[in-house]
Image (spheres, grey):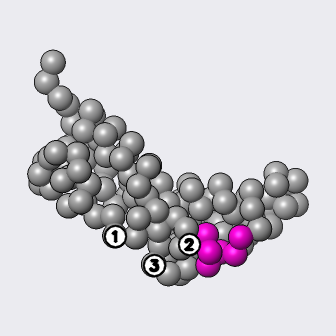
Amino acid sequence: MPITAKDIENQVIAYVSYHYSEMDLTLDKTAERLGYSTRTLQRCLHARGNRWLAILNTARAEAGHKLLVSTDKSIISIANEVGYLTPAAFRKHYANRYHVSPAHARMEARDHGTR
């Protein structure tokens, strides 16, 4: 059975879900590790209505969210741990994903006893 764009998208998501914390993770590196050309990954993700950077930012934001609501680590520490070069980048992508700031999400988690 031939490999489909969905199969490749799932491989990318799985790879990024495991390697999101690497600050030097790139589309080129992901393609090389999965055995595809960069262009093939781009085409397959585009065909699925997805982008590599969106997959990476989602994985990092979700990992950051888990740390925000389950630890007392600083936002700076969490940003670095999940692969962002700056806390500002983490705040931006977190807010895009969850529609609240990381600080607000942490405060809500504390208020609702989810920690």
Extreme residue toward the top, this view: 1
Q: Residue at x 16, y 45 (%)?
A: 35
Position of 90 relative to 13 (above/below):
below
Decide if residue 12 is in sight here: yes
Mark 1 vs mark 2, foreground winner is: 1
Assign a secondary structure to mark 2. Answer: helix
Label located before the other in sequence (3 or 2) = 2
- Identify the residue position indicated by label 2 in the image: 79
> Where residue 28 sits: x, y (%)?
20, 61
- 10 Å crowding of disc 2: few (<14), some (14-19), many (20+): many
| Three-letter amino acid code at the position of disc 1 | Asp
Label located before the other in sequence (3 or 1) = 1
> Where residue 63 sits: x, y (%)?
57, 56
Q: Residue at x 33, y 38 (%)?
A: 10
> Where residue 34 sits: x, y (%)?
22, 45
SS majority, magenta: helix
Q: Quadrant of residue 94?
A: bottom right
- 10 Å crowding of disc 3: few (<14), some (14-19), many (20+): some
Decide if residue 101 is in sight here: no
- Identify the residue position indicated by label 1 in the image: 24
Q: Is residue 52 left or right of residue 36?
A: right
Gap between marks 3 and 2 measured at Cα: 7 Å
Indicate yes or no whether the magenta region holds residue 2.
no
What's the mark number on residue 62? none
In this view of the protein, which residue sits in the foreground, 36 or 54?
36
Q: Residue at x 49, y 60 (%)?
A: 60
Q: Quadrant of residue 103?
A: bottom right
Assign a secondary structure to mark 1. Answer: loop
Q: Contact (CB < 8 A) between labels 3 and 2?
A: no
Q: Is residue 65 left or right of residue 93?
A: right
Magenta stretch, residue numbers: 73-78
